[in-house]
């Protein structure tokens, strides 16, 4: 299993039309074959400068690689991510033994 996680801060204002469009596009990523346990969270701690966290699992490396090269994911990154995300950290993990 691989857990894909991305924490990020948006450029657009909370509640804006841009934010709504961005999250509509984010939620479509859950429809990509191989994506499991798709969850989008809003940050609640004042200790973090990131506003949101996106998490999903993949059963194996093939599913993970297929997601990354899937046309829907590639288009999302090009059309929404690049223009709307101010900064982010991406972490991908596999279980330890």
Image: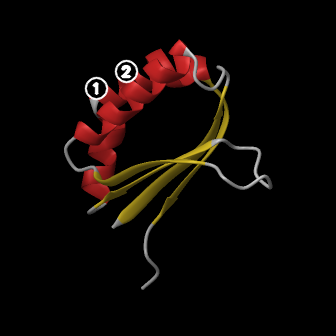
Decide if residue 47 is on the left or right side of residue 3: right
Decide if residue 34 is on the left or right side of residue 3: left
Q: Nearer the viewer, residue 22 or 64?
A: 22
Placement of the C terminus among the 4 image quadrants: bottom left
Q: Are marks 1 and 2 in contact (CB under 8 Å)?
A: yes
- Element type at mark 2: helix
Q: Nearer the viewer, residue 28 or 57?
A: 28
Q: Position of residue 78 (x, y in %)?
A: 46, 19
Where does label 2 land, which residue? 75
Decide if residue 12 is on the left or right side of residue 75: right
Query: Vertical placement of 48 versus 97: above or below?
Result: above
- Element type at mark 1: helix
Where does label 1 land, which residue? 71
Query: Vertical placement of 29 versus 53: above or below?
Result: above
Residue at the limit of the structure toward the bottom, as seen here: 97
Q: Which mark is residue 17?
A: none
The quadrant where residue 26 appears: top left
Q: Position of residue 94 (x, y in %)?
A: 43, 69
Q: In the image, what residue occupies the spot 35% across and 58% down?
A: 57
Q: In the image, what residue occupies the spot 28% across and 33% down?
A: 70
Q: Position of residue 62 (x, y in %)?
A: 26, 54
| Label 1, residues with CA under 10 Å away: few <14, some 14-19, many ≥20 | few
Q: Position of residue 2 (x, y in %)?
A: 38, 62
Q: How is the image coloured?
A: secondary structure
| Label 2, residues with CA under 10 Å away: few <14, some 14-19, many ≥20 | few
Q: How much space separates mark 1 and mark 2, taking CA atoms? A: 6 Å
Residue at the limit of the structure toward the front, as seen here: 15
């Amino acid at each position: 299993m691989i857990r894909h996680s991305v924490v990020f801060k948006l450029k657009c204002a909370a509640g804006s039309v841009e934010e709504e469009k961005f999250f509509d596009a984010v939620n479509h990523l859950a429809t990509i074959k191989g994506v499991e346990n798709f969850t989008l969270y809003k940050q609640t701690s004042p200790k973090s400068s990131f506003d949101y966290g996106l998490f999903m699992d993949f059963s194996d490396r093939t599913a993970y690689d297929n997601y990354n090269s899937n046309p829907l994911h590639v288009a999302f990154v090009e059309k929404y991510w690049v223009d709307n995300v101010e900064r982010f950290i991406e972490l991908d993990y596999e279980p330890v033994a």
